[in-house]
Image (spheres, rainbow, N blue to C red):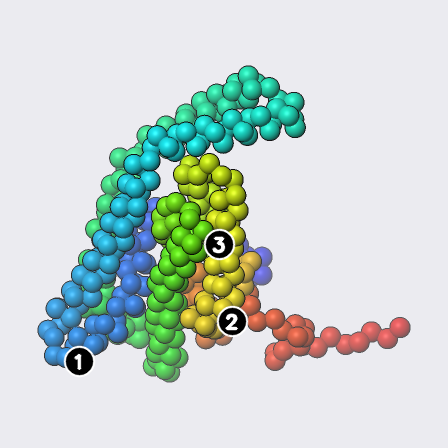
Amino acid sequence: MPVTIKRSIELLGLFLIGAIIVIGKIIIMPLLMSFFISIILLPVYRFFRKHKFPDVLAVILPILLVIIVIALIIWLFYNQTSFLLHDYSKIEKNITTHLNALSLWISRVFDFSPTEQLKFIRDQSNKFFSYAASILSGAAGSATGILLFFGLLPIYTYLLIMNRNIFMKFILMCFEPKEHTNIKDVMQQIEKMGKKYLLGLLIQLCYITILLWAILAIFGIKHALLIGIIFAFLNLIPYLGALIGNILGVLITLASSESVVDILFVLGAITVVQFLDNNILMPRIVGSQVKLNPLISIIGIFIAGTLTGISGMFLALPVIAVLKIIFDRTEQFKKWGVLLGDEKPAKPMHFPGYPLTKKISS
């Protein structure tokens, strides 16, 4: 078959996969999320089974533990947000002060009068609200999707853990017996990677919240815990989440403080915490389990976000890591494993199976 036809079929296959994901994301995304949650809960399940707990109870107890933890996090976030809303009058005053100062600075530097600024803000606000209204017009459907997503998570997780041996047998029956050893190795690597990576993210969530809260509290920044929680959760979305977290941290500080210096404290604290996380803590926690090409990772995150939303952005890296494990152990797709990884070959033109080019004499 000509190469152009083969590549066209591959592109058509990728397009169909993307279309299936977009159409069925309400079912696919909670299933994918449940798959990774079940990987985390497997050691807990095995612990209960080791201590003679019934099979059903050994599955339900870890799921209940996760639900309790999520409920506590939601309560903590709601509690901190309510503290912020209690200062509404002060927030309104601070925002007015900052906006007046910004207006005077714009008038002085850009010769843009306050009247022209108000007209510009009014026009942009009308556009923004019309855009927001178009988004909120589908709020009922999106709310149903969110309820369905979180409602399916515990059901999928329970069924995946309970029926894992059935799924494993099905996968083995799809391949020749000579491939079974390789498949078992792939499954073990996926479980090891998923467990270490996702547990690392949970640990990261805790220490970023505590570190940022402690540093901001030392400098007397109001709502330090809320800023820490928001930034820690947004940081779970690689690359893009940290940027949004910085912006929200600055906005909360602007709303709760009249001093611009506090913004510098917040940005400095976030920078310090990010440096510790990226260079010291996270490499030790996750180690070498997920070594992915940064460019491919960013592209994958944006594609996943476009197709499936925030849940896709969060799951993009572990999914890419799973694909890399599979590709590295499959002769047909090994080149894609090289593309997804960050191993930099010293001599890219020299490797087994690649014909060496002859040196052309001058």
Give the mark nearest the N terminus, 2 or 3: 3
Give the mark nearest the N terminus, 2 or 1: 1
- For residue 334, the mark is 2
Is 193 placed left or right of 328 in the picture? left
Work out whether residue 154 can be spotted.
Answer: no
3 vs 1, front mark: 3
Amino acid type, label 2: Lys
As measured in the structure, the alpha-carbon distance from the residue carrying label 2 to the one carrying label 1 is 39 Å
| Label 3–label 1 contact, CB within 8 A | no
Note whether 19 is above or below 285 in the view shown.
above
Q: Residue at x 35, y 76 (%)?
A: 188
Q: Looking at the picture, how far across and down is residue 117, in whole percent?
A: 55, 22
The 10 Å Cα crowd at callout 3, few under 14, some 14 to 19, many 20 or more, is some
Q: Nearer the viewer, residue 328 or 268?
A: 268
Q: Looking at the picture, how far across and down is residue 68, in whole percent?
A: 20, 58
- For residue 50, the mark is 1
Q: Which residue is mark 3?
A: 269
Amino acid type, label 1: Lys
Kind of element beneath mark 2: helix
Q: Nearer the viewer, residue 125 or 327?
A: 125
| Label 2–label 3 contact, CB within 8 A | no
Amino acid type, label 3: Ala
Quarter of the rendering containing residue 213: bottom left
2 vs 1, front mark: 1
Is 23 placed left or right of 297 in the picture? left
Work out whether residue 203 can be spotted.
Answer: yes
Quarter of the picture holding the N terminus: bottom right
Kind of element beneath mark 1: helix
Q: Looking at the picture, how far across and down is residue 214, in whole percent?
A: 40, 57
As measured in the structure, the alpha-carbon distance from the residue carrying label 2 to the one carrying label 3 is 42 Å
The 10 Å Cα crowd at callout 1, few under 14, some 14 to 19, many 20 or more, is few
